[in-house]
């Protein structure tokens, strides 16, 4: 196991594969567990797994964490609760291929955020990259139909996925000012925040009469998202960042729409239309241009 945790490229590839599989889980969960129940229960699994192991380290580093607790809580609410709640709700209305390709817009949203909130200078090539990526997302959301763009008649699931991506971009920007604590301590704190902030969503589902506890198949989906995209992938990604640095590790996130689209076609039998191919190429090309160094 020690040797495995020293293989950064394998760890990062597995992390992004698990994140790509989250879209498949979201689609399989339709009719098996309601979206907010899935969101809350996944963080129940993470908290139950992490807190007994990490409570002493969290207590030891609490003096460094406490001053940043409000921002840490907000990041957990946006990046973990808000993103996943909208992600699983969107899965009821759009395909896993769309979910993962639209998710590819996150790096560009982060780049735009660094310009707006941190005054980062942006190069012409990065502007071109942003435009190309957004064109790819638009092609997928419009299903290759210009009439959809003209009338703005987008699938509501695609719209929710765009909002979810915006939430995750906000969480990513917040990482610039994360508290000076160990990665697993910080992740444990955000997981607790996600557990707390997703509970009202379950209560809302119950009040609205739409709450569905997992079926046997739903429990299988829940175990997957709780153990893999929520827990192991985070540990693998943090370890990969430790080994090769955030800049190089961050490039692996671009594999998420690739893995997600491939898994959707292979496991769910979803169609991969010409506009999906065009959108995927544009999204990845745009990200490549945006991250290309001068």
Image (cartoon, rainbow, N blue to C red):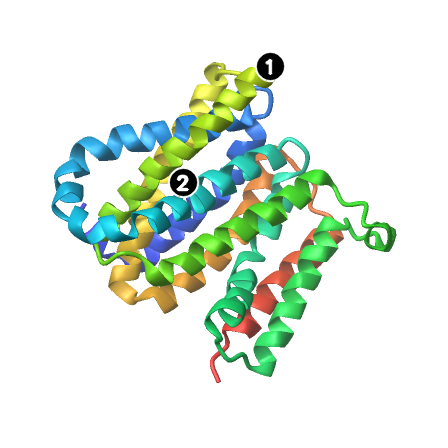
Q: Helix, strand, or loop for circle 1? A: loop
Among the 4 quarters of the image, the one containing residue 139: bottom right
Name the residue at 54% across, 46% down. 260
Residue indicated by mark 1: 209
Name the residue at 83% across, 50% down. 148
Compare residues 260 and 122 and report the one nearer the observer. 122
Among the 4 quarters of the image, the one containing residue 279: bottom right
213 to the left or right of 282:
left
Residue indicated by mark 2: 229
Residue 183 point in image, percent of width and height: 25, 52
**Disc 2 and disc 1: Cα gap in Å?**
28 Å
Q: Helix, strand, or loop for circle 2? A: helix
**In the picture, which quadrant includes the N terminus?**
top left
Compare residues 274 and 25 and report the one nearer the observer. 25
18 to the left or right of 239:
right
Residue 177 point in image, percent of width and height: 34, 61
Name the residue at 24% across, 35% down. 50
117 to the left or right of 142:
left
User: Crowding near pointer 1: few (<14 within 10 Å), some, many (20+)?
Assistant: few
The answer to whether residue 170 is seen in the rendering is yes
The answer to whether 240 is drawn above or below residue 260 in the figure is below
Among the 4 quarters of the image, the one containing residue 285: bottom right
Name the residue at 56% across, 61% down. 109
């Amino acid at each position: 196991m020690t040797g495995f945790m020293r293989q950064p490229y394998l760890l990062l590839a597995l992390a992004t594969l698990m994140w790509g599989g989250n879209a498949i889980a979201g689609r399989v969960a339709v009719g098996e567990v309601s979206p907010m129940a899935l969101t809350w229960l996944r963080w129940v699994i993470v908290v139950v797994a992490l807190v007994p192991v990490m409570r002493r380290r969290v207590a030891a580093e609490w003096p460094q964490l406490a001053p940043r607790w409000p921002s840490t809580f907000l990041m957990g609410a946006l990046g973990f609760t808000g993103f996943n709640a909208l992600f699983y709700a969107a899965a009821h209305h759009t395909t896993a291929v769309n979910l993962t390709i639209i998710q590819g817009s996150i790096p560009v949203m982060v780049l735009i955020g660094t310009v707006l909130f941190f005054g980062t200078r942006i190069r012409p090539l990065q502007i071109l990259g942003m435009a190309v990526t957004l064109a790819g997302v638009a092609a997928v959301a419009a299903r290759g139909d210009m009439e959809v763009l003209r009338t703005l008649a987008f699938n509501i699931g695609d719209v929710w996925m765009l909002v979810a991506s915006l939430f995750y971009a906000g969480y990513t920007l917040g990482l610039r000012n994360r508290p000076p604590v160990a990665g697993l301590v910080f992740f444990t704190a955000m997981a607790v925040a996600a557990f707390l902030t997703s509970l009202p969503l379950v209560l809302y589902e119950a009040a609205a009469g739409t709450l569905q506890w997992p079926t046997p198949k739903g429990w299988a989906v829940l175990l997957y998202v709780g153990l893999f995209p929520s827990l192991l992938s985070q540990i693998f990604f943090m370890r990969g960042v430790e080994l090769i640095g955030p800049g190089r590790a961050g490039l692996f996130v671009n594999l998420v729409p690739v893995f997600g689209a491939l898994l959707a076609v292979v496991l769910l039998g979803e169609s991969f239309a010409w506009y999906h191919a065009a959108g995927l190429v544009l999204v990845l090309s745009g990200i490549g241009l945006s991250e290309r160094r001068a």
